[in-house]
Image: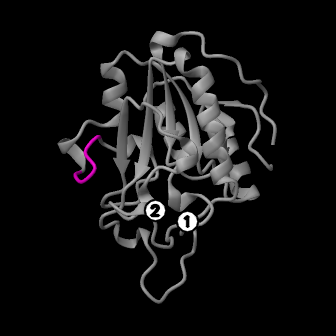
Amino acid sequence: MTANTRATPATRREHRSLIIVDVQNDFCEGGTLAVPGGAAVAASIRRYFTEHRPEYSAVVATRDHHIDPGRHFAAAGTEPDYVTTWPVHCRAHTPGAELHPELGDPPLDAVFYSGQYDDGYSGFDGTTDADLDGDDGVALGDWLRGRGIDTVDVVGIATDHCVRATALDAAAAGFPTRVLLEHTAGVAADTVTAALEQMRAAGVELVGTVPGR
């Protein structure tokens, strides 16, 4: 799955942000909703961040942070369908919800918590308050605009779910958006293909290839 462009350095540091999506223990090997290659992508993001940090005026992370997400978790005694229902994951204030250690300890400018009381696929649904939704924290889009950011790069987990949703919302909000595919991990080939097509159709620039695809 090869996009039409190669990774090139960001050229307008004062206006660009890197968004690291949901690189959490439960989404990496050994977690309750592990994505193949998640830990490797966490390490690749760390290397990319170390090399390219001067090109970004802000680096932020999003985190799944489920308190009571309702039907997002499969009901007890039932199998998740992995489309609208999922195994229990990223429970608020549990080790599974923490950033993966392979990501290192990047000096993030902000962290945005999503999914407290809903699915929370997009980082643009998140706020800076871990335990409250809506008006009780600063939303990602508002935070970026407040700092003069007008362009974003997206990396993280999973290409076909939360990365896709975050990139689509970024583009819909008016931010020229790139997804750096080599720093993402996808769940399944067919859903990754559909996600790439959807993002491309929405005007998201796809850079590189998804590892293993």
Which residue is outermost to the left? Answer: 136
Give percent across and percent down for residue 43. 63, 42
Amino acid marked by disc 1: Gly
Give left or right: position of 186 versus 15. right
Point out residue 5 in the picture as x, y percentages from the top left corner: 76, 24
Q: Position of residue 42 (x, y in %)?
A: 60, 45
Q: Nearer the viewer, residue 24 or 161?
A: 24
Magenta range: 128-132
Residue 170 inside the magenta-drawn segment: no
- Say the numbered circle drawn on residue 31: 1
Left or right: 2, with 170 as reference point:
right
* Image-quadrant location for residue 37: bottom right
Name the residue: 65% across, 45% down. Answer: 41
Label drawn at residue 96 = 2
Q: Earlier in the sequence, mark 2 or mark 1?
A: 1
Check whether the beta carbons of the residues at disc 2 and disc 1 lie within 8 A of each other: yes
| Residue located 63% across and 47% down the image | 159
Marks 2 and 1, Cα distance to the nearest angstrom?
Answer: 7 Å
Q: Position of residue 194 (x, y in %)?
A: 69, 50
Q: Helix or strand or loop: what does disc 1 sit on?
A: loop
What kind of residue is marked 2?
Gly
